[in-house]
Amino acid sequence: MSLSFLKRSPTKVVLVGLNYRDHAKELKMRLPEPILFLKPPTAVIGPEENIVYPAQATRVDYEAELAVVIKTKCKDLGQDEVMEHVEGFTCLNDVTARDLQSKDVQWTRAKSFDTFCPVGPQIVKDIEPNNVKIQSYLNGELRQDSNTSNFIFSVEELVSFASKVMTLLPGDIIATGTPSGIGAMKRGDTIEIKIEGIGTLRNYVK
C-alpha cells in the first residue's frame, strides 16, 4: 500500500523521547520536559511495506506510537489552538536501531534509516487522542498494551511545544512517544501497531 492516505508528504517527522508514565517507570526515569528529535521524510513508509534491517545494526526495535498529522502551517500555537491545525491521527512505528542509539549517544543515525518510520493505515479525526488504547503485536504476540491516558504530555501540549521550536507545515507528522514493552525485531518478523479507532499498521522486517 502506498502513502496515498496522506494528502501531503511530510517535510519532517517530529518525535518525543519519553511520554508515557509506564515507560518512564520501566526506564526508571524522572518525568521530563518534552525531548524532541526528528526523522527525515525518507524514513516514511506505508502499511504492508518492508522495514529494511540495516547491515550496520545488531538490534532493531519496534515502538508503537500515536501520530498527529498537521493540516495547516502553524507556529507558536497555544494549546487551545492546536486542534484547529490538526488533520487527524494515525499509527506510527518509531523503528530504532537500539545498539546504534546507545553507541552514538545522540539518536540521528539510530532513528533515521530508510523505512524506519512506518505510518498508517489511515488518518482519523474523530477520536479522543488522549484516551485511546494502543498496542503492538510481534508475530501475533501482544508486546505493548497501554492507553494514551498514560501520556505525560497531552497531544495539545506536545504540538504546542513543537510549534514554539519550529514552524509546522501541512503534512508534517508529530509522534507522541511509546509505552512500555518495546523490544527487538528480527528479519522475517511481522510487526503490527494497533490503535483504538484508527486500525492496524502492519509491516514486515526484511
Image: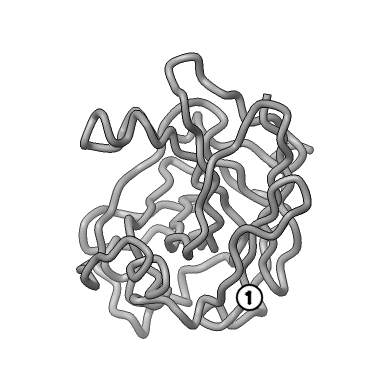
User: What residue is shown at x 31% (from left), y 33% (from top)?
Assistant: 108
Q: Position of residue 159 (x, y in %)?
A: 36, 67
Task: Name which quarter of the figure residue 52 lies in.
Answer: top right
Vertical relation: 16 (above or below) 197: above
- Give whichever of 163, 205 is nearer the camera: 205
Q: Report the coloring of the rendering.
A: one colour
Q: Residues within 10 Å of mark 1 (few under 14, many from 20)?
A: some
Q: Nearer the viewer, residue 109 or 126?
A: 109
Residue 39 percent location from the top left of the image: 40, 39
Identity of the residue drawn at 36% across and 85% down: 80
Q: Amino acid at mark 1?
A: Lys
Left or right, 60 with reference to 19: right
User: Helix or strand or loop: what does disc 1 sit on?
Assistant: strand
Q: Quadrant of the N terminus?
A: top right
Q: Is residue 121 left or right of residue 72?
A: right
Given residues 83 and 21, the one toward you in this image is 21
Q: Is residue 72 visible?
A: yes
**Camera-nearest residue between 116 and 139:** 139
Relative vertical location of residue 177 with respect to residue 99 in this rendering, above or below: below
Q: How many marks?
A: 1
Residue 144 pos. (x, y %): 59, 62
Q: Is residue 159 visible to us here? A: no
Q: Quadrant of residue 45?
A: top right
User: Which residue position is annotated with label 1?
Assistant: 133
Residue drawn where x is 68% and y is 24% of the image: 206
Q: Residue furthest top?
A: 55
Does residue 88 lie above or below 21 as drawn?
A: above
Q: Is residue 144 left or right of residue 59?
A: right
Q: Position of residue 143 (x, y in %)?
A: 62, 58
Q: Is residue 5 above or below residue 30?
A: above
